[in-house]
Image (tube, rainbow, N blue to C red):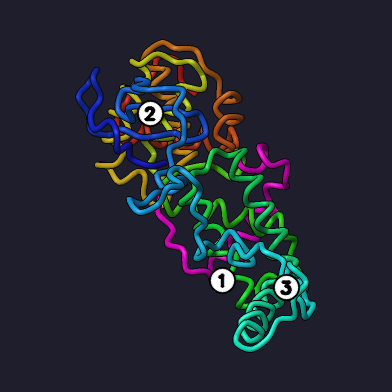
Amino acid sequence: MKNSDSIKRCKDCNSDQVFTDYSRGEIFCGNCGAILEENLLEKDPNIFTSTSDSDDKGLPSPNTNTYMSHDRNLRTEISTGRYDGTGKLIKGKNKETVYRLLKAQNLSKVSSSNERRHIKAIQCINGFSSRLGMPDDMREMVGKAFKEALSRKITRGRNTEYIVASLIYAVFRNYGYPRTLNEISEELGLERKRIGRYYRELIKDIDIEQKMPDIQYFISSYSRKLNLSKDVSTEGINIFFMADSAGIKDGKTPAGLAAAILYVACKKCGSKVTQSQLSKISGVTEVTIRTRYKEIIKRLNITMQDKE
C-alpha cells in the first residue's frame, strides 16, 4: 500500500488516510472505505524524456543503470570482421575503437549460469509484477534485491520463480503495501508455504526493510471485497483504534486481527458475514478469527447479542 500523492484527503470524512491500490487501480479512504478515484493508469515520468537540444522528443530514453537489464541495455551487435560496413579495411584508431566495442559486447553477452538465471529472473519479475499491479519503482527494487542475492550466492539450489515471488512479497512489505502471501500465491499460481519459506530464508541476507502492514488497509480492503457498507468499515476502524489503545494488536498477525475486527463490526452493525468468508479473503484460519474475536470483545467489554 502506498499513500496517494494526487489526493490528500477524503471528500466524505476529511481523513488524510488516503491510499492507492495499484492492483485494482483505485484510490480509496482507509478511514471510511470510500472510493475516491478509480480506473487509474500507471504514470511513469521516466518513460519518455526529451531535451531542448534534441529533435527526437518523446523517444524512450534507456536507463543504463537499471537492475532490470542483465546487459545494461547494450543491444547493438558489432561484426568481428576486419572490414567496416562499406567493405573498407579498418585501420589505426578506428581499429582500437572497434576492439574496445567488441570487448564491451562480449562482456554483455550471456556466458554463465548466473547470467542465464538473471535473465530468467527479469522475465519472472516483469510477468509477475504486471499481474500484481506493481509500479516500476517497486519492480526495480525487486530486480536490485535479486541481483544482490545472486552476488551473495544465496540463490543456489532455489527455484528462481519462488525467489522472485518471495522478494516481491518483501518489497510489498517494504512499501507498506499489505499484499498477503495468499493473494500472491493465488495470483501467481505458486505454493504459499514455499513462498513463505523462501521469504524467511532470504530476508535474513537481503537488505530490504520490512514494515508492519497497515491494519486499517486490511479492514477497508476486506470490507470492499465483501461489499459491506461504509458504516461497517467505519465501525471497524473505530474498533481498531480502541484495540490499539488497549494493546491488543501487539504481536498479532495484521490480516487475522483485521478479519476479527471486521467480524465484530459486522455483528455490531447487523451485517451478515461468516467466519468462513473472512477466512477465505484474509488467508487466516477460522480458529484464528474466533480467537481474536473473543479477545477483542472481552478486553474492550463489547456485548454481543449472539455469543460465539
Q: Which one is nearer the viewer's eye here, 68 or 298?
A: 68
Q: Which mark is residue 27?
A: 2
Q: Outermost residue toward the bottom?
A: 92
Q: Amino acid at mark 3?
A: Asp
Residue at 53 percent of width and 64 percent of height: 144
Residue at 49 percent of width and 39 percent of height: 256
Q: Which mark is residue 62?
A: none
Mark 3 vs 1, N-terminal side = 3
Specify few, some or many for label 3: CA neighbours under 10 Å numbering under 14, 14-19, or 20 or more: some
**Residue 13 to residue 195: above or below:** above
Name the residue carrying label 3.
Answer: 84
Mark 2 vs 1, N-terminal side = 2
**Residue 156 in view here:** no
The quadrant where residue 84 appears: bottom right
Judge whether residue 38 is colored magenta: no
Q: Which residues are magenta?
A: 184-212
